[in-house]
Every structure is written in structure tokens, then in C-alpha cells.
Amino acid sequence: MKTSKENSEYYNWGNNCKGWHLAKSENLSIIEELMPANTSEQRHYHNFSEQYFYVLKGTATFEIENKILEVNKGEGIHVHPQVVHQIKNEKSADLEFIVISQPTTKGDRINQPFENKELNLNGKKFKSVSSTNNGEVSSSTLFKYRQKRNIIWATYEGGEILFGTLSGRIEKDNLIFTYQHQNKNGDFKTGKCKSIIEIKDEVLILKEKWEWTCDDYSKGESTLKEIK
């Protein structure tokens, strides 16, 4: 079905600002918005949603992590998860723009004043920097993480590992999950792991204590470091 402002869900926000939901689902939100002259929204961030703003008319003034940027008609700006931002219309004419959010920002918006941000592993990559000898992960193994609320999952491959998956959850600053993979010998391996999350120089470190749930059921330790 074709959509436009005329047949889309409408709402008011802020000081006489308006929005039209052109697309609205759990995984995608597209809104056309109108901000009259000299209006602004509250400073905020989203834990998991990333957004793209495209200006249709006027000039938007963005404050992004304390940097001021003007975005004019025909220009856009990408705002990543957990980045504090605010949009303002400081001009004398109306501002109209499209904002695309993936996934939807419903329940994912944190307004100022801010407390501690939630951990976000979604889209992050890790490599091993150390491991005990009974493990199969090496510096050639790449982990690609995804997250939805406190649920985490990942794929990993490289080195002795052809392909593997893990699935689990976040509990405070810990990851608890089970894993399985196939190695180059064609063996299928399974195990369980608890990771303590640390942050050093804005880089995530996973201190892992794991145990095979196959073969000799031995235990080991590994350290993974985020790849920027």
C-alpha cells in the first residue's frame, strides 16, 4: 500500500511539532516530521536503534555529543546507537525532515538526565588475544555479535574453526551463553561460557571462563578484544 501524510498515523510532540508514521514496525520506523520555527526536542540517545535524518525543507541544527552541525535541505545525517543527540529548528521558517530508525525506537529512548548507559554489543566484532591450550579459538577467529535487549547471539569462524554460533544473555556485566562449532577436522564441539565484561580505553574486553560439554569436559579461559 502506498503511504503519505494523508493516510498515515499522525501525532503531536513538543511545542506544536508534528509527525506522520510512514512505516511502523518492530524492525523499522520511518517518520516524516515538521518542526515550526524556534523549536527543539529533548537531548536523548537510543540504546539499540540507529537513525538517519534527511532534511526535506529548511535547516536542521543538530547537537551530537556536544558538536553543533547544520544540515540543510537535501542533506542527511546518520546517528549511531548510544550517541547523545538533539535536533533544533533555530530558523524562522518551518523544518521538515524524514527520520528512519532501525529497529524502532519504541521503548529504546533515554532522555536527559542520563544514568549509566546499557551495554550494547549489537554489531560489535571481537578477536581472541589469549586462550588456554585446550581451546580452539585463536587470533584468527572472528566473533560477530548481535543483541536485542538482554539477549545476545554471535557467529564465529576462522583459524581451526570452520563455523560456530553462540546464544545467551547479559546479566549485569556478564555474558552467559552456550556455544557450538565445527572445526577443520570435521568435529562438532559444544560448550558453555561465562564472560566478564571490562572496558579499557573505550574498547570492550571479554574475560571468558568456559567449559567443554563434549569430549574431556575440560575447562579453560580466553580473552577477547573488541575490533574497532
Image (spheres, rainbow, N blue to C red):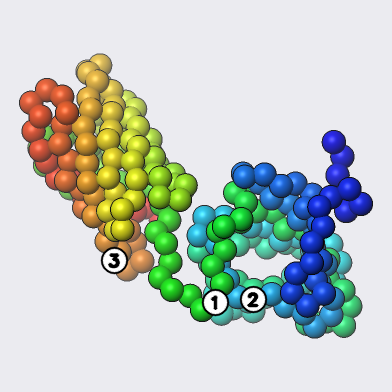
Residue at screen point 22% across, 46% down: 194
What amino acid does circle 1 point to? Gln
Residue 142 visible? The answer is no
Circles 1 and 2 in contact, beta carbons < 8 Å: yes
Q: Callout 2: 10 Å neighbours few (<14), some, many (20+)?
A: few
- Of callouts 1 and 2, the N-terminal one: 2
Q: Residue furthest top?
A: 186
Mark 1 vs mark 3: in front: 1
Amino acid carrying label 3: it is Lys
Above or below, 206 against 157 in this view is below
- Is residue 25 found left or right of 120 in the rendered image? right
Residue on which disc 1 sits: 112
**78 left or right, relative to 227:** right
The residue carrying pointer 3 sits among few (fewer than 14), some (14 to 19) or many (20 or more) residues within 10 Å by Cα, namely few
At mark 3, the secondary structure is strand
Q: Earlier along the polypeptide chain: callout 3 or callout 2? A: 2
